[in-house]
Amino acid sequence: MVKRKASLQVKADLSNLFSDQPQKKIIDGYPIDKALAVVLRQMNAAGMRKRTISDYKLHVEHFAQITGCLVLEELTADHVYTWLSSMDVSNSTKLIRLKCLKAFLGRCFRNGWITSNFWADIKIKVDQPVKEGATDGEIKMLLSLLDLTKFVELRDAAAILVMYQTGIRVGTLSQLEQKHVDLEAKLLRIDGGIIKNHQAIYLPFDDILVRILAALVQQNDVIRDERKVDNDFLFITKDGGTIMTSPTNNNITKRLCRYARDYGLRNINPHALRRGFAKNLLRKGADVALISKALGHSDLAVTTRYLHVSQNEVVDNLRKFL
């Protein structure tokens, strides 16, 4: 009986000798999944946006799946490069995902779970094209095509003008409540709870938007009463619900894409509206610090990149100093 057990053990050992799948060395350490869970709780407690938290979870889990790593202590720069090489996406998309992974690893480093920031020198070169902003002409063209007697198109017109006149993000727009709108003072009074940098801000708007928002508020009340819905959102669906059902599913964004496609308008999307707001301020003489504050940026360098101008714009502005 003993000889039979010994023989089986020998066969088992020999069967692994020529295996194509080498046995993975088990490394003790802090589990990546546990670290991610803790980091996500910290982010949630700090009031970070659901979209940001969702991106952390998505990209870190993908990194762990591709590399097969289980603990933080086994991670190296080679693992990051392996992960990046596995992606069949543009360099711009890779850069976004890399930034998210680096942010996660940075939190692990500050929490004392990693002893070196091996990822610091990993970079992806991306050519930054000049991104155009929406123009007054495009906004006027689109608004002239909308039927403001229809609730959805009235709501969309209000959303377009709010983003174009105040520069707020579409995520912030979806969380606006009627308490944030001061029609008499012609102001959005937004508290830090729905702003990316968590700093409250006041943003003015014009008389046209006053009238449109007043009509929208009135229609919202009618819809909520008919649908028996209890909320105070400024932008709602025709059934009275929220326009953003998930961090990546926003009704306004979809509607703007549809308008751009149907009417052949290039720069009708939330980012183009926000960029158009910033470039309007720059063109009218506002300094970068003021624009940065209005956009809710925490770093002037971000605003400078945001206002990247074309060669023709540089020439036109330089001529003013000749």
Image (cartoon, helix red, strand yellow):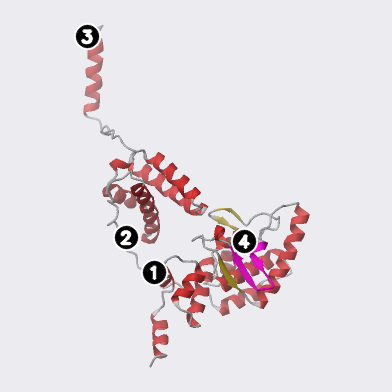
Residue 255 in the image: state x and y as whole percent.
60, 63
Q: Amino acid at mark 2?
A: Ile
Q: CA distance from mark 2 to mark 4?
A: 36 Å
For the residue labelled by badge 4, is the local secondary structure a helix, a strand or a loop? loop
Q: CA distance from mark 4 to mark 1?
A: 27 Å
Residue corresponding to mark 4: 176
Q: Determine contact: label 3, label 1, CB under 8 Å.
A: no
Q: Is residue 56 left or right of residue 180?
A: left
Closer to us: mark 3 or mark 1?
A: 1
Identify the image quadrant of the N terminus. Answer: top left
- N-terminal of the pair, mark 3 or mark 1, is 3
Q: Residue at x 47, y 54 (%)?
A: 52
For the residue labelled by badge 1, is the local secondary structure a helix, a strand or a loop? helix
Closer to us: mark 2 or mark 4?
A: 4
Residue 201 in the image: state x and y as whole percent.
55, 67
- N-terminal of the pair, mark 1 or mark 2, is 2
Q: Amino acid at mark 3?
A: Lys
Magenta residues span: 178-190
Residue farthest along the top direction in this orientation: 1
Residue 124 tag number: 2
Residue corresponding to mark 3: 3
Residue corresponding to mark 1: 301
Residue 74 tag number: none
Q: Residues within 10 Å of mark 3 (few under 14, many from 20)?
A: few
Q: Amino acid at mark 1?
A: Ala
